[in-house]
Amino acid sequence: MTEAPDPEVVELATKIFDLARQGQTEALVAYVDAGVPANLTNDRGDSLVMLAAYHGHADAVRALLARGAEAGRVNDLGQTPLAGAVFKGETEVIKALLEAGADPAAGTPSAVDTARMFGKTELLELFGAN
């Protein structure tokens, strides 16, 4: 039988995930620099990078990647931060993830599939997937 998580830990994790969603880079990286895992994930497998990417916070994405977060970490649904950024049209986030080695063909749907679905030919060219 697993023990219920400490409510204070859950509260802190919720705060950190909110910092990623809101793009509060300085506060977010202070937690990571203090020991919070750069690849911390929520109950759906969404990483801090996923949340920052989906909400369009390129600076937060770059800062997390610089601290060892994985650019292509998939969530429980098989989605990647790159596909989320393509879906939301976040060009600066897309560039940051690609620079960090995110694979446009990874995930379900992949960033390539997402770009095709929404007719984003400029991204298909960027991905080399015309």
Image (cartoon, rainbow, N blue to C red):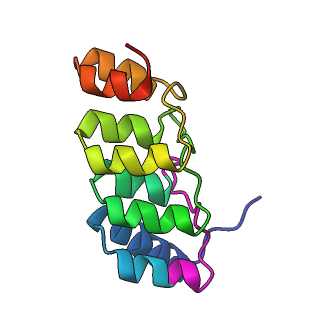
The answer to whether 102 is drawn above or below residue 23 in the figure is above
**Magenta highlight on residue 98:** no
Residue 98: x and y in percent read 47, 43
Residue 127: x and y in percent read 42, 27
- Residue 59 versus residue 1: which sits nearer the camera? 59
Residue at 47 percent of width and 78 percent of height: 29
| Magenta extent | 31-46
Quarter occupied by the N terminus: bottom right
Residue 13: x and y in percent read 49, 72
Residue at 34 percent of width and 50 percent of height: 93
- Residue 121 versus residue 57: which sits nearer the camera? 121
The answer to whether 7 is drawn above or below residue 74 in the figure is below
Residue at 35 percent of width and 65 percent of height: 59
Residue 81: x and y in percent read 44, 44
Q: In this view, does 83 lie to the left or right of 100?
A: left
- Residue 127 versus residue 36: which sits nearer the camera? 127
Q: In this view, does 58 lie to the left or right of 101?
A: left
**Magenta highlight on residue 36:** yes
